[in-house]
Image (tube, grey):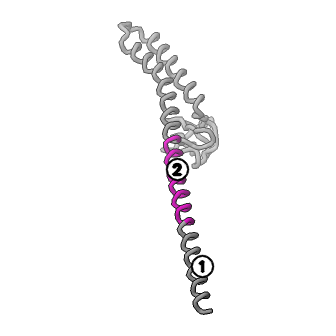
Amino acid sequence: MLVNDEHEHNQTVKALKETIKDKEECYLRVMADFDNYRKRIERDIESEKREGEKKLIFELLEIVDNLERALSSGECNINSFKEGIHVIYVQLLEIFKKHGAYSFEAIGKKFDPRFHQAIGSMESHDFPNGIIGEEFRKGYYFYEDLLRPSLVRVVKN
């Protein structure tokens, strides 16, 4: 009887070892598949990012072309030069808007340190205390996120 029990025990151990080996191979295959999947996703994300950047740069090339034309123009008329620069400015704002970036008004609004950066104070008869009286640099949003705060001067009478 003892020999039979030992034989059954050896068979059980052998079967368990084979099961463990099969599970290990399955685990290694799953890990290799997952690693390949992760690498493919990373490549796809990088490719999408590059494609988005490429589209933005392509849109900005028209502005670069217009700036080059303005700079190479032999015309010295300041008004036509200003008009050309204004057209380029409008083009650039349209590209910003198309890609989710837009400015916000600060003058006449209550100062809020979440959206405005005060670089000084000023006296004004047009606005009460705590209201923004001057803006030195526009603030911008990127979709719902603040991209850059406005640089302002706040009224302090």
Q: Which structural element holds mark 1?
A: helix
Front residue of 139/3: it is: 3
List the residue tagged with mark 2. Answer: 38
SS state under label 2: helix
Residue 122 seen from this side: no
Identify residue for label 1: 12
- Spatial separation of the CA atoms under disc 1 and disc 2: 38 Å
Which residue: 57% across, 34% down?
Answer: 101
Quarter of the image with the N terminus is bottom right
Q: Position of residue 80 (x, y in %)?
A: 46, 10
Q: Amino acid at mark 1?
A: Thr
Q: Are marks 1 and 2 in contact (CB under 8 Å)?
A: no
Q: Residue at x 54, y 40 (%)?
A: 150
**In this view, which residue lies farthest toward the bottom?**
2
Q: Is residue 77 above or below residue 120?
A: above
Horizontal side, residue 128 vs residue 150: left or right: right
Residue displayed at 48% across by 35% down: 50
Indicate yes or no whether the magenta region holds residue 32: yes
Quarter of the image for residue 147 reads top right
Tag 2: amino acid: Arg
Q: Find the magenta span and give its range.
A: 22-44
Evaluate whether residue 70 shows in this view. Answer: yes
Q: Main secondary structure of the magenta part?
A: helix
The residue closer to the viewer here, 22 or 148, is: 22
x then y, percent, for residue 83: 49, 13
**x and y, in percent, of residue 6 in the image:** 57, 87
Question: 40 or 65: nearer the eye?
Answer: 40
